Amino acid sequence: MRSHEPGPRPPNPAGATSLVPFSRLDPPGQNIVQFRGATVRYGRVTALRDITLDIRCGSSTAILGRNGAGKSTLLRAVLGWQPLTSGDIRIGDAHPQHARPRLAYVPQRHAIDWDFPITVRGVVEQGRYPSLRLFQRMGRADSERVDCALEELGISGLAHRHIRMLSGGQQQRTFLARALAQGGDIFLLDEPFAGLDLFAVEELSHILGNWESQGRTVVAAVHDPAIARRCFTRGVLLDTGLVADGPIADVLSAANIDRAYRSEHCVHEGRPRPAEAAEARR
Amino acid sequence: MSLHDLLLAPFSYEFMRRGLLSALLLSVSGGLLGCVLVLRRMALMGDALSHSLLPGVAAAWLLFGTSTVALFLGGLIAGLLTALGSALLSRLTRIKEDAAFGSLFIVFFGAGVALISRLPTRLNLADFLFGNILGVGAGDLWLSAAVSGVTAALFAVFHRSILLETFDPVFYRATGGRGGLVHMGFLTLTVLNLVAAMQAMGIVLALGLFLLPAVSAYLWCDRFVPMLLLSIALAMLGSAVGILLSFHLGLASGAAIVLCLGLVFVASALFSPRYGAVRSLLRGGGRLPGT
């Protein structure tokens, strides 16, 4: 297993059981993330309006909507660093800031500086940093977790490569491995399919499907409804407010898509809001 | 001229020993800071920051004379005012951060030059700007040692936070890190080091000691820690050779150090086997930006 070539076949030799241990799993089907009237305003611009919705444990949910519909804001609110103007979000029964060990975040690929002097393994090790105390070094248990995460995503053979020397799909898998190494059970992905070629989309969809069948919860902002329909079981359609949520096929009905994507007030279409852009930088 | 005359004899002078030691100490902290400046794309901001120290230093000189502590605090206050001021301006007005920084630093620099031109003493503006190794006193040496020690210690303790906040600030925040704190701490450290390097290098040239070894190391290394170590080594080598050159050829010490480091930088940019310009051209064309 250890030295297999990272070739063009679906990774995850482990099948339906995960190599990487993860913690505190709620019973499947229970509501693991709960929004109650969650609202976010940047000055006078409303980014997220009165969202009430539940995300089930062990489901894979696509967050959909046009640019500026609040997808990223919703992810950041779940991560606990986007303060809500009003309303409430709970992870299990905890405030997001107290649920950090359960949450694993995967950034957009274009947000990463691929020239940064770091190897694949270096990135995956970052997943262990949050659980290390200030003067604590990476221990054996940490290294083993990193090994497992690399193996589960089929990139053990690339561990010592610089991150630029990877294909788009391998780069994406590196960050998925970092998320795995964190040991959480809720995965938040920001536009994971953006910029991937057809094969890499297939591969990522396979990995996310595996995670779901292992009882992990996957929540991803997705731009493309067609990809969402193929790769996720549930959907949440946003237009700053909630347009629809439920099984992906129902959410992406023609009427809902029309409502969410042909909205009259797409003032910020195609261009991030200044407040959001500034927020994303810092 | 024998090897002894070339390499060792200059250090029979106390001011040369002090200058060298001060430069070597600052090579450690400057090499570390420079790497982070480069990776955070703050190289030009560092340059602006260094210019903005001038009024603080000049005012301290005016009020308290040659006191090292006063110069240090004056520079620190001016630098932090610029950093905070531009952060506030970019947040509260339409101005973006680069324009805010660029505008504030030039105002500060102008104020500094104005202050110095009114000074009643025979103080030389050029010494402030470009450094004078003869002026490195025992106090400056202690200052360099303290600043270098604090910087190295903070890097040792917080290297994971620094790496993470620089590489992926969103992830760092998502895991409970305080990104703003790391950023401000980093700016403060940069100002501290610039002030400490002022006497030997001058505030305009001091950034060269930080930046040039780091950019050179960036062209050679694919890992963070080796990049830090190479950057420190290059900074030390450059300052030692530069100081010798300045002695033998009668050059300004800051300029001599910057030129030596500049040579390493140009050579790296051209001939680095993986990331150099020559290799890019030989392979036909440059790299696609942003891929």
Image: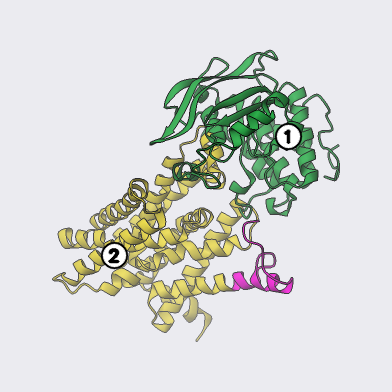
Chain colours: A green, B yellow
In this rendering, does residue A132 appear at all?
no
Residue type at tag 2:
Phe
In this rendering, does residue A17 appear at all?
yes
- Per the model, the C-alpha gap separating discs 2 and 1 is 52 Å
Q: Is residue B182 above or below residue B127?
A: above
The image position of residue A279, as x and y in percent, is: 46, 41
Total numbered labels placed on residues in the image = 2
Q: Which quarter of the figure is the C terminus of chain B placed in?
A: bottom right
Does the magenta segment cover residue B193? no
Q: Chain of mark 1?
A: A
Residue type at tag 1:
Ala
Magenta extent? B267-291
Q: Is residue A121 above or below residue B127?
A: above
Marker disc for residue B109: 2
Q: Quadrant of residue B190?
A: bottom left
Q: Is residue B161 left or right of residue B129?
A: right
The residue carrying mark 1 is A149
Q: Residue visible at 63% across and 23% down?
A: A245
The local crowd at label 2, few if under 14, some if 14 to 19, many if 20 or more residues have their Cα within 10 Å, is: many
Q: Residue visible at 54% across and 63% down?
A: B215
Q: Chain of mark 2?
A: B
Which numbered disc, 2 or 1, marks the residue closer to the eye? 2
Q: Is residue A107 left or right of residue B68?
A: right
